[in-house]
Amino acid sequence: MLKQIAEIPLPGPAVRFDYQSLDAKNGRLYIAHMNADQLVVFDVQKRQVDAQTNKLIASIQLGGGAGNTACDAGPGHILVAVHGANELVAINPAQLKIIGRYKLPGIENPHGIALDQTNRLAFIAGEENHSLAVFDLNSMKLLSVFQVGDDPDVLAFDPGLSRLYVSAESGTVTVLEESNRTLHMLGQFHMPHAHTVSVDPKTHLVYFPLENVAGKPLLRIMELAKLH
């Protein structure tokens, strides 16, 4: 399904990583090294770590814990998975205010989000009940719910191949294919600490920052292998 092609040492201690964001245009992978209080910026072409700084501009109260966020490029809204409330919340970033709240029946503690912008779909992981939602971004309604590995966390979608990667706290990585606005299971594999994932839509390479391999953090890079 996936085969390893590289492992890159990462800075900082062997502690938890979290969400990632890949800027395919500029070839930068931003990795939250959460328990090290670091943002790691990785050059995917040179395969080396860069430096970057950021600053806070606003805080918005969501009424529950904030999971992952995603930018819906169509209307330009920010989508946030809110656990506890079991909602998907839409934010207008220009006004810095909430403009919509959408219930997610069958999804407990929504956390990770990935978008298929072409087909106007959001994929949302429910970490409490190992569930995965397919959500229509036009009607803003839930379409279907699937089961994945225990404690799903971070999602990554490759639009060119219509592949969705679901990484989980349990170490289970689920690979699905999107077709006709639904998902089909391609397979699963296990990798310790692989609860966060990203994919480069240009190269189709898949990135797993692993917090502790032989006592050190590293970035495991994988590519698609033939499915049997």
Image (cartoon, helix red, strand yellow):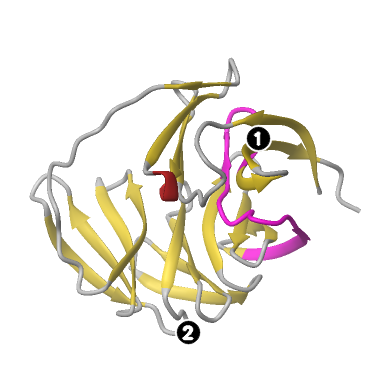
Disc sitting over residue 9 in the figure: none
Above or below — where is 156 with respect to 110? above
Residue 92 in view (yes/no): yes
Disc sitting over residue 106 in the figure: 2
Horizontal side of 161 relative to 129 (left or right) equals right
Extreme-top residue of the structure: 46
**Residue 134 percent location from the top left of the image:** 50, 68
Extreme-left residue of the structure: 95
**Residue 193 percent location from the top left of the image:** 64, 55
User: Which residue does the image show at 66% across and 70% down from the upper left?
Assistant: 149
Horizontal side of 221 relative to 67 (left or right) equals right
**Residue 172 percent location from the top left of the image:** 69, 63
Residue sitting nearer the eye, 134 or 208: 208
Quadrant in the rendering for residue 46: top right
**Which residue in the protein does label 1 denote?**
204
Q: CA distance from mark 1 to mark 2?
A: 31 Å
Extreme-bottom residue of the structure: 106
Above or below — where is 217 with respect to 181? above
Above or below — where is 181 with respect to 85? above
Secondary structure under tag 2 reads loop
User: Which residue does the image show at 59% across and 64% down from the upper left?
Assistant: 169
Name the amino acid type tagged 2.
Gly
What's the magenta region?
A: 183-208
